[in-house]
Amino acid sequence: MSAFWARNRLALMGAGLLAAILLAVLVGPFFTASPIAIDITNKLVPPSTAHWLGTDFFGRDVLARVLHGGRATLAIGIGVVALAFVIGVSFGTVAGFAGGAADMVMMRLVDAMLAFPGLVLAIALAAAFGPSLENAMLAVAITLAPQFARVARSQALAISVKPYMEAAMAIGVGTPRLLLRYVLRNGIGPLLVQASLALGGAILQTASLGFLGLGAQPPAAEWGADVAGNLAYLRDAPWVALAPGIAILLAVLSFNLIGDALADWFNPRRRAA
């Protein structure tokens, strides 16, 4: 693994940026004020030594809201991708391994979901489920699962015809063990790449739902919701919206840098170059 970091400077940069973000959101809230503490006498105060990122319209410390909101946003992204990974990989692996009519029916369902733009489908599902953080996570996970299903299916199709698979079936290895030990284990590389890239997309989609009022509800701190809630003050107090917006940008950038490096690493042609 050390060779991976040595050959991929961008991955090292992304990992360092992600580590800094995680350290800030995990440790920082212990040294800041409450993100929901209101102080009307100090509303829209510009950045200063007392409030490093200023305050919002309600006098709440913007730095405190960014740090506390980071916990929610990053946890959402990881939870959404984990759920989408389990659902999509299970579905796609079974479809690719089974083949025939089962594969055709299962993949047509996936194609039907992929026919809708991801964000549009997430908005429709979140609106149908009702505005809440949990429903937003479920909606985004459902929109991401077909992507994992497609990758998992292609891996299952390629691995199922390998000689070691034929040998395992010949000696009577059961189907669950075939799927877990042989198909999933040998096809995990592209799935990890997809997961790392999906993390950035999950954060963006969840933030978009929060921006539309379908995610985290006030007064909870969450980056997307905070950007939406502070847009009205962007001209007079730009820090209130720029701070959570830049936090989203940096988090997505870190995941994308790592994902791109993993894609190069698991590609034999690029790895040999």
Image (spheres, helix red, strand yellow):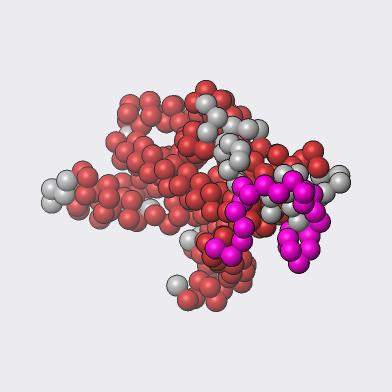
Say if the magenta span includes residue 48: yes
The residue at the far left in this view is 171
Magenta stretch mostly in which secondary structure?
A: loop
Region of the chain picked out in magenta, as a range: 30-53
Q: Nearer the viewer, residue 50 or 247?
A: 50
Q: Residue at x 45, y 31 (%)?
A: 110
If the image is split into quadrants, where does the C terminus sit?
Answer: bottom right
Residue situated in front as seen by the camera: 45 or 87: 45
Residue 166 position within the rendered picture, expressed as x and y whole percent measured from the top left: 23, 49
Q: Is residue 127 left or right of residue 97?
A: right
Residue lying at 52% horizontally and 38% vertically, measured from the top left: 133
Is residue 126 or residue 236 the one in the foreground? 236
Residue 180 left/right relative to 77: left
Instruction: From this view, report whether residue 155 is shown above or below residue 139.
Output: below
Q: Is residue 201 visible?
A: no
Q: Nearer the viewer, residue 251 or 155?
A: 251
Q: Can residue 98 be seen by looking at this rendering?
A: yes
What residue is drawn where x is 49% and y is 76%? 3
Residue 166 higher or lower than 112, as above or below:
below
Q: Tell me where residue 24 sits by quadrant.
A: bottom right
Q: Position of residue 231 (x, y in %)?
A: 77, 40
Furthest residue in direction right, as rendered: 236
Q: Quadrant of the N terminus?
A: bottom left
Residue 39 in percent (x, y) is at: 71, 49
Expressed as whole percent of the image width and height from the top left, the position of residue 65 reads: 63, 52
Residue 93 located within the stretch drawn in magenta: no
In the image, residue 64 above or below residue 140: below
Q: Residue at x 43, y 27 (%)?
A: 109
